[in-house]
Amino acid sequence: MKTRHIFFVCIILSVIFSGCGKNGPLFYKKSSFFQKINVNKYSIYYNDQRLNVDYNDLLVSLYRAPGEAGTIAPAVDSELKTITNRIFETYKGTGEIDVIIEVCIVEGYAEFVARSMLETEKVLCRLKVNVMEKETSNLIKSSTGECWGQRKSLEASDEMLRSMFYKSYEMALADALNKLQVST
């Protein structure tokens, strides 16, 4: 009887340690801020180009059947705006030009898929950033950024999916800003 329990525990532990994993730049790439954008003042405008924006949580149920799945495209909320402002303050250099920064969310979602033993949580965020002169609305510079990540776990949750999405948004925005060089 003890041997049976030990065997069962060994199987479960091997599934946990071999199956639970993370991949994608979300988990392995550092969101470091390098290049300063030399502007005086800026205002941020959001252009959400996704057709399926959700204003509610995914509501991952506690008990999921194998094959059950769900996808959410989180709306631009106060947390995304806070992330955006924090990152732009980090990137802002000193300059003389006032700009409008348009953050276009081209694609962004969080999803989960339940399997027999493990669940997969996946996020993707693809952005385009346009920097325009405030007085004339002329485009000064444009760039794109993206980040994705996926992890396998025993228990998917709304909190983890939302946290992963916010992190992928932050890293996609940092990716786009690292490609910009706006000078006066």
Image (cartoon, helix red, strand yellow):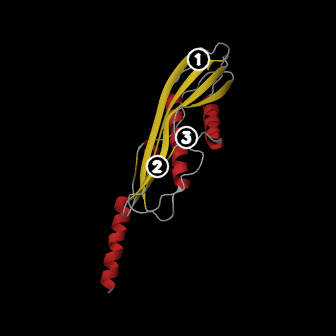
Circle 1 — which element?
loop
Give amino acid for label 2: Glu
Task: Write down the quadrant of residue 14 in the picture.
Answer: bottom left
Q: Image height check: is 103 above or below 148?
A: above
Q: Which residue is mark 3?
A: 53
**Mark 1 or 3, which is nearer the eye?**
3
Pointer 1 and pointer 3: residues touching (CB < 8 Å)?
no
**Of the residues under marks 2 and 3, which one precedes in the sequence?**
3
Q: CA distance from mark 2 to mark 3?
A: 13 Å
Question: What percent of the width, then of the height, locates residue 59?
Answer: 54, 56
Q: Which residue is mark 1?
A: 183
Mark count:
3
Q: Which residue is mark 2?
A: 111
**Mark 2 or 1, which is nearer the eye?**
2
Circle 3 — which element?
loop
Outermost residue to the front = 51
Give amino acid for label 1: Ser
Give amino acid for label 3: Val
Q: Of 144 and 52, which appears nearest the observer?
A: 52
Q: Is residue 17 left or right of residue 60?
A: left
Outermost residue to the bottom = 1
